[in-house]
Image (tube, coloured by chain):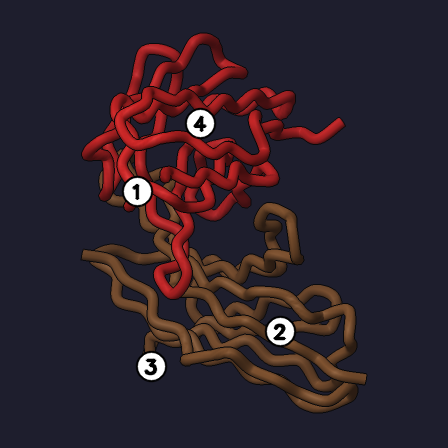
């Protein structure tokens, strides 16, 4: 079956530090890949996405590149802010004959805390 | 108002009680989903619906049931709540194409004592 594995957390950084959160996947079909973010007390919201190999998704200074050869979609940001403190989820969605449309398979989530 | 609204936001219930969690959306999307979030496990799919007449089980449907009352409303029921159903529950909607984003409600925190 499909699965997503994220790096173990939590991750604690100082403001302006570089962030990497690793994400690897296994999928029976050809997936689209996503990063969702969950701020305290809120639901998940889409941070960025990539739909085919070598695509780079980017938003709010975050980036991730779809690497088919390594089945990875690592999240990076060059300089984190306190406001980036949240839980980050890597996810995939696979079209498997039409019945999988929109269904997301999530990683376990990585808690990021950024200190001033 | 939020595009995807869940009620209640918090609920404490006793073991064996029936409870319903409700979700309504103003996105106009056909597809709706119920996920459960547990620490260290991410979100797991309970049920999903592609339209009013189409209901499908997700990976963890045992102990749950759903009702799609209208395009905009999708309810999750726990017929006889048990403590290991204590979790954060999220409703989501999407257009349905696999690379289109899903929109989530703010979640319902359910505690079964």
Q: Colour of chain B?
A: red
Asked whether the beta carbons under mark 2 and mark 4 sit within 8 Å of each other, the answer is no
Q: Is residue A91 above or below residue B15?
A: below
Residue A70 has which mark?
Answer: 3
| Category of crowding for the residue at label 4, using alpha-carbon neighbours closer than 10 angstroms: few (below 14), some (14–19), many (at least 20) | many
Q: Disc 4 to disc 1, how far (Cα)?
A: 29 Å
Say which element carries label 4.
strand
What secondary structure is marked by label 3? loop
The picture places residue A47, in percent across and down from the top left corner, at: 62, 59
Mark 2 and mark 4: Cα distance apart in space: 28 Å
On the image, the x and y values in percent for residue A86 come to 63, 65
Q: Residue at x 38, y 22 (%)?
A: B19
Q: Which residue is mark 1?
A: B83
Residue in the image at 22% along x and 31% along y = B63
- Quadrant occupied by the N terminus of chain A: bottom left
Q: Earlier in the sequence, mark 4 or mark 1?
A: 4
Judging by the rendered image, the residue that carries numbered circle 4 is B31
Label 3–label 2 contact, CB within 8 A = no
Q: Return the disc, 3 or 2, that comes first in the chain's sequence.
A: 2
In front of the other: label 1 or label 3? 1
Residue drawn at x 61%, y 50% is A45
On the image, the x and y values in percent for residue A68 come to: 35, 74
């Amino acid at each position: 079956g499909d699965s997503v594995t994220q790096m173990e957390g939590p991750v604690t950084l100082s403001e302006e530090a570089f962030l990497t959160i690793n994400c690897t996947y296994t999928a029976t079909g050809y997936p689209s890949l996503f990063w969702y973010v969950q701020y305290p007390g809120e639901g998940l919201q889409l941070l960025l996405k990539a739909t085919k190999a070598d695509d780079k998704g980017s938003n709010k200074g975050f980036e991730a590149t779809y690497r088919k050869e390594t089945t990875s979609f690592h999240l990076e940001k060059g300089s984190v802010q306190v406001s980036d403190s949240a839980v980050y989820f890597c996810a995939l969605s696979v079209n498997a004959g039409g019945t999988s449309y929109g269904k997301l398979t999530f990683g376990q989530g990585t808690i990021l805390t950024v200190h001033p | 108002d939020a595009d995807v609204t869940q009620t209640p936001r918090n609920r404490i219930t006793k073991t064996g009680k029936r409870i319903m969690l409700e979700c309504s959306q103003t996105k106009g999307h056909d597809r709706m989903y119920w996920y459960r979030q547990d620490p260290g496990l991410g979100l797991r799919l309970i049920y999903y619906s592609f339209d009013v007449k189409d209901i499908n089980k997700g990976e963890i449907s045992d102990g749950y049931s759903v009702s799609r009352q209208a395009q905009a409303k999708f309810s999750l029921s726990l017929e006889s709540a048990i403590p290991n159903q204590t979790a954060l529950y999220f409703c989501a909607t999407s257009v349905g194409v696999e690379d289109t984003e899903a929109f989530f409600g703010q979640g319902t925190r359910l505690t079964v004592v």
